[in-house]
Image: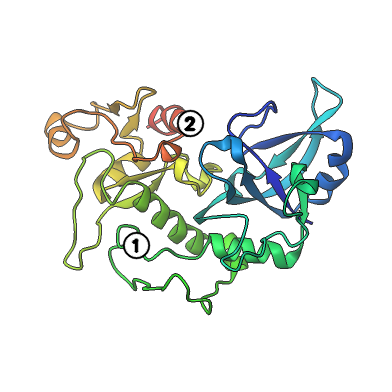
Amino acid sequence: MHAVFIQNPKSIYRDTRGERYHFPNRKLLPRVLETVGDWVVFYQGRRSGGGMGYSCVQKVIAVRPDPNDPTHSFAELDPGSALDFERFVSRAKHSGQLYESTLAPMGGNNQDSVRPLSQADFAAIVNEGLREVPDIEAHPRTGPLHDLAEDQAAFTIDRRVVLTSRAARDAAFGRMVRRAYGGRCAISGLRLRNGGGRAEVQAAHIRPVAHGGPDVVRNGLALSGTLHWMFDRGLIAVAEDHSIMVSHNKVDLETVARLIHPDRRLMLPADPRHHPHPDYLRYHREEIYGRA
């Protein structure tokens, strides 16, 4: 069964975003158990500080009791299945109709932190969330650039392909990361353009996909091709304070001076919600950079 999970950054629950969802057993346990093996949509409410709406989709793989509180449980999430929405999806469509067809306009089941979601409602939310944004900053350096009108209702996607295809997920992840960083390399600071005016930067996963890394903006860096190659091979990393770490026994000073901004600090997206997550940066330092 599909469902909506309400999740806010400031919460009394012991969630670990992208890994587990903490909830009270009373009333909610039967609902959450029905989502095991299926996809759920995450919704952030008024307390999120970033607007109300649907923000990402992820797969539930198990439910286990909270070992410290028998009245609560955890929904275990598949970390590698997480995919941010390209478009933040509000509660209502342009027509005013709610995306959740069984949701009360006010009160009632709005208070439920886990809400069942029909196949049709799930499809409508995911289709809108994964619809491409016509933004030259976000698109790859080559290939078609979709010029879609905002009201082009005929535009549809096969959400099953986007949710499960590595190529489709990489493309969506790349657009979102390039857009978040404004087409600028986060380590060199350069905003290079090709003849078509498109950004030359690539989207690098901080925690690699092969290591369970998700396709979310906070697990991404916009990097030039060379720096992307160096980052993936652990020749460079990002410290806890966002300073750039270099494996000097493998990278000479001339290369550092030529490729890395003189400040030797990561250049962050304008929106704090898109800043790299410390857990992903730490994983890269310990498992990729530390073992290079």
Mark 1 burial class by Cα count in 10 Å: few <14, some 14-19, many 20+:
some
Q: Is 37 located above or below residue 149 in the figure?
A: above
Residue labelled with disc 2: 283
Which residue shows up at 52% across the image and 60% down it?
Answer: 166
Q: Is 71 located above or below residue 85 in the figure?
A: above
Question: Residue 41 at x, y = what percent?
Answer: 65, 52
Question: Residue 49 at x, y = what percent?
Answer: 52, 36
| Residue type indicated by callout 1 | Asp
Q: Disc 1 vs disc 2: which is toward the camera?
A: 1
Colour logic: rainbow
| Residue type indicated by callout 2 | Tyr
Position of 154 with respect to 111 (left or right) is: left
Position of 268 with respect to 262 (left or right) is: right
Which residue shows up at 53% across the image and 79% down it?
Answer: 154
**Which quadrant: the C terminus?**
top left
Residue labelled with disc 1: 135
**Which quadrant: the N terminus?**
bottom right
Label ID, residue 254: none
Question: Residue 150 at x, y = what percent?
Answer: 44, 70
Quarter assignment of residue 92: bottom right
Q: Is residue 36 visible?
A: no
Give me the C-alpha separation between circle 1 and circle 2.
Answer: 31 Å
Q: Secondary structure at mark 2?
A: helix
Question: Residue 147 at x, y = what percent?
Answer: 36, 73
Circle nearer the N terminus (1, 2): 1
Q: Secondary structure at mark 1?
A: loop
Which residue shows up at 71% across the image and 59% down it?
Answer: 100
Mark 2 burial class by Cα count in 10 Å: few <14, some 14-19, many 20+:
some
Quarter assignment of residue 267: top left
Q: Is residue 28 visible?
A: yes
Q: Is 208 located above or below residue 264 in the figure?
A: below
